[in-house]
Each structure stands twice: as C-alpha cells, then as structure tokens.
Image (tube, grey):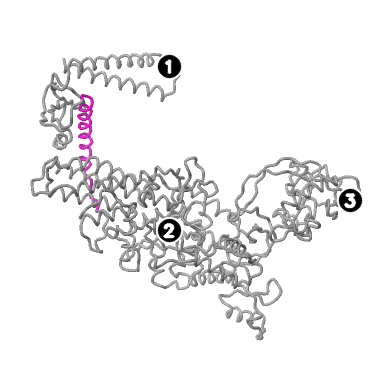
Amino acid sequence: MTIPSQFDAKAAEGKWYDYWMKHNYFHSEPDHRTPYTIVIPPPNVTGVLHMGHMLNNTIQDVLIRRARLKGFNACWVPGTDHASIATEAKVVAKLKEEGINKADLTREEFLKHAWEWTDKYGGVILEQLKKLGASCDWDRTKFTMDDDMSASVIRSFVDLYNKGLIYRGYRMVNWDPEAKTTLSDEEVNYEERQGKLYHLKYKIEGSGEYVTIATTRPETILGDTAICINPNDERYTHLKGKKAIVPIANRVIPIIFDEYVDMEFGTGCLKVTPAHDVNDKELGERHNLEIIDIFNEDASLNSYGLHYAGKDRFVVRDEIAKELETIGSLEKTEVHVNKVGTSERTKAVIEPRLSDQWFLKMEDLVKPAIKAVLESDEIKLYPKRFDNTYRHWLENIRDWNISRQLWWGQQIPAYYYGDGKEDFVVAENAADALALAKTKTGNENLSAADLKQDPDALDTWFSSWLWPMAVFGGIMDPENKDYKYYYPTNDLVTGPDILFFWVARMIIAGYEYAGDKPFSNVYLTGLVRDKQRRKMSKSLGNSPDPLDLIEKFGADGVRTGLLLSASAGNDIMFDEELCAQGKAFANKIWNAFRLIKGWEVADIDQPEHARMAISWYEAKLNKTLAEIEDHFEKYRISDALMAIYKLVWDDFCSWFLEMIKPGYQQPIDRETYNKAIEMLEANLKLLHPFMPFLTEEIWQYIADRTPEEALIIAKWPMQKQADERLIGLFENATEVISGIRTIRKDKNIPFKDAIDMKVLNNEAWPTEFDSIIKKLGNIAELEYVSEKVNGALTFRAGSNEYFIPVTGAVNVEEEIAKLTEELNYNKGFLKSVQAKLSNEKFVGSAPEKVVAMERQKEADALAKIATIEQSLASLK
C-alpha cells in the first residue's frame, strides 16, 4: 500500500465520516454496558456554525469519543431549538420582503410559513457539525417543536398549573417593541448610554409656584398621574394637599408623599408614571393612582400621546423637549449617562409595560437546585468559581414570566370560555379543556366553538429546560427503557452566559419531574475572542468562518488549535496561528508514521539500545496516561491534550524514533518494529478524541482492519504502573546527549564522525542508558575512568564529568585562547555581581526577589568559571 507523502485532510474527513456513519458507530441503544450520555445545547434553528459552536462541540466530541474508547455505551443526542423570538423575526422579515404583513395572516397561515422556513434552513448547523467530526447519534436528533417534544412542554405546563405553581398575573414586564413580546429579566442586557437629563417645571394648581422634576424620558410625562415627595422633606411641606399640572397635557394630578423618594437626589420631587416604571407602579398601588399607558405595542404613542399619537417614542422625545422649551416648562438640559435595558435578541430598547402574563412561582422550585450544586455537590460546575454566580442568581430568583406574545412556539394550553380574566381552564388538548369547562361552569351546552385558546406562546427556555428528559421521552413516558437507561446524563458542556437561562432551569426541572439531577458535571467554556480580546461578532468582522478554517487547516488542525488554548471557563484569544499549530502537529504525526512504515524489517537480533528505548517509552506512556486521567477527572481538557501533544511530539517523535531508527540503509529488527507500531497505535488511541480523522486514517493504513477493528471503537490503552526510576535515568541520559551535541556543534565535529568518550564516575552511576548515549551521540567507545583526562574537551552532567579526547579536527591553541577569553569575561561579570552583593545598602533596601536574582547570577558565574577552568586544565 502506497502511503501519500502528505496527509490529505479533506479526503480523509469525507471518507471516514461516511465510513463511521455507514457502520452506525455513533448510534446507541440500551444494553449491558454503563451508559455515558451527553445532550447537545441545542443551537437555534436559525443558526449557522460560529467559533463558539466549534469550541463547545469539539469538547463534547472529545468526551464522547473518549467514553466510546473506554468501553462506555456512549450516546450524544443532537438537536435544535425553535428559538421563538429569533425565528419569528426572521420569518416576519422574509414575509415583509414578499410584501406580506404578519398582521394580515391568521396564526395557521403564519405557522405554515414558519415551518417552511424551518424545513429549508433548520438543518444547516447540524450538517455543519458533521464537518467538524461531531459523532452525534443522528438517529436521535430532536427539535424542540417536534410533536413529542411539544407534548412534553404542554404536559409540564398543565402539571405545574394544577400544582398551583403557574398563575396569570397583571404585572410590569420587560416589553420588546420590535419583537412585540414580553421578555424575562434574564433576556434584558443593560448597557451604559449617553443621553440627556431634562429638568421640567410642573405648575402648582392655583398658584404661581412650580416644582422641578428631572427625567431622562420627557415623553412619559403624558402618562404621569402624580408628583411624589418625601414626607420628611421640609422644603415641600406646604404642598401637602395641593395638586400639580402636567405640562402640555394640562392634566391635574395629586402631590403625594412617600418615604420611597430620596430627599438628597435631584430636586427631591419625583414624577410618578405607574404604567411605565416598576417602582412607580408600586407607588401607584399604594396611593390608588390612575394608570395611563401611553404606548402602543411597537412603542409608538397611542391616543394618550395627544398630538404625538402614532409617532415613535424617540422621535417624540426630541419633539416634546422642543415644545416644553417653547412653553417655558423646560428649565435646563444636561448630558447624562444611564443604564438602558435592551433586548438580548433584537437589541431594541425595552419598555416597562403592564400586561397580563403567565408566571411560574420559583421560590420552592429552586430549593433542590440550590442544594444540589452548593451544598451536596451532586452537581459540580467547572470551574468552581461559577458557584458564586449560580448562588447569586438562584438566591435572588423572581417568578418566571413564561408567556411570550408570539405565534412560533408551543401555544399556552389555557382555554377561555367567557369574557372574564378568570374564565379559563388549562388542559393538554381542546377536548379535555371542553370537558373541564363544562364541569367548571355547569353548562353542558358548551361546545368547542365556545372555547378560545390563549394566543401567547411559551418562553423558549420553558421548552428547553426539559431537554435532558424530553429527548428520551421522560415527561410523556417516564417508564420507557431509554429514559430509565440514559437519564441522568453525565456531562453538560455549555457557555457561562446561559448558566441561569438554561443550566439552572434544567436542574430545577430535573428535580421536579425526575427527582434526580439532569447531569453530574457542567463544563463551562470561555468565550472565543480575537487577539485584541474583543468578543467575536459579525458586526466587528473579526469572526472567521469555521468552515473556511476547516478547509484551510483541516478539522483536526482546527480542533487541536482551539483546544490547546481552551482551559475551562477562560476566554480564548483566537489566532489562526493556533490552527496552523494544530495542522503542523497533524503533519508531524503523519511523517512519524511514514518514517516507521518506510523501514525495512528483518529477522535479526534486537539491539540493546532499542530494548532500552522501548522500556523507557512504555514507562513514559504509562506516566502520561495517569496524567491524562487526572486532567479529564478535573475537566482540564486543554491540559490533557497538552500532555498528549508533548508525549507524541517530544517523547515519541524526537526521542523514541531517533533511538530505534536503524542506521543508513540498514534494516530494523522485527521485534522493535512491532513494538514501534504498538506504541504508535497507543498514541493514536490517545489522540483520536481530539484528532479523529487523522488517527483513523493512519490506523487503517497500518493494517487491513475489519469494521469491528476500526479505531473509533478500539480500546483505550490499559494503564500500568510507570517505572519512575527509568524515566529519571533517561532524563540524566538526555543531559549527557545534549552535552555531546553541544560540543559537536561548538567544535564543528560532524555527526557522521564517531568519537570516543570517557566518564569520570564520581558515584555509583547506572549504565542502563549507555547504549542510547552511544547511539545518539555517535560514540565509538565509552569508557569509565578514575582520573581526569588531559587534552580533552569536557562537560558535566549530574555528578559525572565527561571527556571527549581532542582529535586533529580541533586546534588546541585556538581552543585555549577562546576559553581564556571566555574565562576572563565571566570573572569580570562575577566581580561586578559580587560588588553589588557586598554593598550593604543594596542588600538591605533592594526587593528580596532582586537580591535573590543577583545571588543566582553569582552561583551561575562560579559554576561556569569552574567548568571553563577544568576545560583549560585538560587542554594544557
């Protein structure tokens, strides 16, 4: 079989992925083995592969492939999330381009368009994951809007409602005027923006007096229903019982007194707009104030906006400021920086809005989730520092607003049979709802036509919090074999940005429905940033296309490059050089394989140096195996890869192959060759989770393999006790070899020229690696002596002194002159260092680290002088 001179990543990726799929290696069914289960954080159905996905899914694939090699029944469930807001926005935009307005469509007509869009684009990201090498069980692919998944969500809602945990409430919510839906607190991002602070004058009714109030939102004065002052503020006690007049609207509003107002802030007077501020709403409830909502659902002004009706809020802000100035009600304007809430999805500035919404009570639900992570350690977060973030969110949790004013998603299973707010029943389907409505009303004449289902959809997270259970049918049929076998899952790999959105909520759902944790370990990845530490984004143009990177560097190169620098929870400063490093590593492994396969094999005796090389590498392999296990146990995936990288690049390629390599045009003995292949195969097993394509390609080239012998389902190397003594001895040997190579380089002694070496052995010195030293140093004769050798070049390693007799190739006089010059320089350097150290003022006042550094310089100089003097003595 002809082995190509270079690894063709593109050809290998297509060939082996098809091979793995053909032989169904990714698929899992319950059996006698211990399961190892991962569920994918379902990417948005609207999404395409980005660098964050690359990192996240590479880590998952590493874990799942390693579990397969370790004999577990590995199951990685893929899927996508319907992403209510994002998907609906894309469908609305597409319809707009076609001249269709969503408002002109029925729900059924709109959903038909949404499903067409999903069917066309929804599978893109999953197909892209295959290019990465993701070994998901594609037969188990789930979509959060699949019939069985939606049924699970609806059953969950009905169950929680019947337990008294879901309720309907008229509350102040975060309103996204672009998506025209409510958002949970966690879906709002706060950012500092520079705006203006407007100082407005409100006249006191029946007098020439006025009070000044500062606001960042002058347009909301049209919804003002009171002025509030602290009752302890002596400046305004004379205003008790008085009323103020709202500028422009000329509406008379009461002046109320409440200790909520901070006397030290601003003028001490506060405008109260109960429909548009959560704190104002609480004030309004305490003082029975009128509620005036001035906004339409798109944040344009409604009829309460008077002559501004129909205009956008930000347009009105500028126009009303000018009008206020014209009528003398604007005292002054200042530049002001404040935090503005924006929608995570649409980036629109959110509006506080009073609305009827559905809420889930969280106070009791959250308790098992707090205990599992923060008290019992049933679930571990990696890195552990995220425990504090988790604690903060869960100990300060508020009821969850789970309804969204969208059509794309699971429709809330509440059915209204009358006009009152409480005239509804909750059921899994219309037939059950009708039966419940008849019972509740006592009206047997009710028909399906009399029922109207709540138009709102459920929050996407209310769907995905059931993900680890629902993908195995655990909500609809908790006794089914898949659910009982695969749940709870083992590891979850995700980003810390959804620690609360998704991770905590899955934990809450797991304990509520299964009485068990959904997973044991949560590996939180960092963000992928550019070299300037900027978050990667399309708008900045700093995010490379992952598929372009795979095309350029190969999937294995990109995976390796990313993971070499991806320690848990820490951001990655991405640079294409990382992928180039990964590709170079792949080439190194390929060339090592070609080198071994290029040797002629003969039935000859095994030389001593080869026997020792094998013993050492086996010891090194076992030591590295122990390190790898420790890294994986602690979820230090990057460290595990680095340990393998050093083993393969340094120990295997740079040392082991050099030690066993036969002489020019000489054959290698069969025993050593077979061991070399065995060691290479062990390396391939360790590398396979990280570099699946390259390793399977080499594995299949090494020998003709049946499908049952493919690397993907091979056995992880068996760990044995590492011979630490042998490893230590080899480190000493490398020091000697390095000394020989330095002398050859400095004295221009060609490596092809064999040289003699004598060793002054100052203590009992193991000689096991002498054969290695002779081979790698090209030493003709290695002799142990009891006295120093004159007329020789010398170096020290450990407690031994090594002498290489001078040959005709070295000019002794020139060498003595060179060494003398070097000696004089070092003595001068030593003198300057010692002068500094003898200065009591310096030693007493300089930092301890600086003094220690000077002492180290002194010690190094003394050692160097001693070595040079020995070399001179041996040459004279």
Residue at the disc numbered 2: 128
Report the quarter where the N terminus lies.
bottom left
- Can you see residue 403? no
Give the CA distance from mark 1 to mark 3.
79 Å
Position of residue 221 in the picture relative to residue 500 (left or right): right
User: Which amino acid type corresponds to the residue marked 3 in the rendered image?
Assistant: Glu
Q: Which residues are magenta?
A: 718-747
Task: Give the foreground label among 2 and 3.
Answer: 2
Position of residue 487 in the picture relative to residue 223 (left or right): left
Where does the image place residue 711, in percent across and percent down from the top left?
27, 58
Image marks 1 and 2: residues in contact by CB distance under 8 Å:
no
Give the farthest residue toward the bottom: 445
* Helix, strand or loop under label 1: helix
Tell me what residue is drawn at x 74 percent, y 42 percent. 265
Residue at the disc numbered 3: 205
Residue at the disc numbered 1: 842
